[in-house]
Image: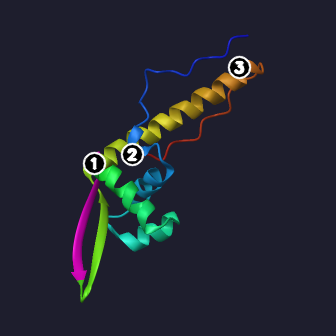
Amino acid sequence: MTPDVPPTDGPALDAAFRHPTRLTVAAFLSACDEAEFGTVRDYCQVSDSVLSKAAAGLEAAGYLGIRKGAVGRRFRTWLSLTPTGHDALARHLAALQDIASAARSAGARARGGTAPPASPSSGP
């Protein structure tokens, strides 16, 4: 039996989200207008340097906005997902869902059954 080849005509995975920290940052920021660097760092459970590198990669892709300012005497950095970043994340998540659905269907066919019903996508 020849395994099914995953479809290539659907949405493509975005290389900018290949690193788990970048994907986590984008997913977190997709639910808010902006967040302070430390809040994102704590959520992602990474060091400042790891978050800085992930943020720089997303910013270079045009997916992340970085705003710096002061609160009292302390400097702060805020991160936000750009409209392009929101769109790219939605496409990436759709591609992941397509891959998972195709794999479930192929696995079900391989064992002679039918695929379980796909869970409804909640959308971006």
Q: Is residue 19 visible?
A: yes
Q: Decide which of 80, 52 is in the foreground and name it.
A: 52
What range is drawn magenta here? Answer: 60-70
User: Residue visible at 38% across and 56% down?
Assistant: 53
Residue with the mark numbered 1: 60
Q: Is residue 12 above or below residue 2?
A: below
Q: Earlier in the sequence, mark 3 or mark 2?
A: 2
Q: Amino acid at mark 3?
A: Arg
Query: How many numbered markers are drawn?
Result: 3
| Foreground tag (3 vs 2) | 2
Q: Is 76 covered by the magenta stretch?
A: no
How far is the residue under mark 2 from the one under mark 1? 15 Å
The image's colouring method is rainbow
How far is the residue under mark 1 from the one under mark 3? 42 Å
User: Residue visible at 68% across and 27% down?
Assistant: 115
Q: Quadrant of residue 10?
A: top left
Report the quarter where the N terminus lies: top right
Q: Amino acid at mark 2?
A: Leu
Element class at badge 1: helix
Residue at the outermost bottom position: 72
Q: Quadrant of residue 34?
A: bottom left
Element class at badge 3: helix
For residue 99, side relative to residue 22 (left or right): right
Element class at badge 2: helix
Residue with the mark numbered 3: 109
Pinpoint residue 109: horizontal percent, then vertical percent.
71, 19
Residue with the mark numbered 2: 89
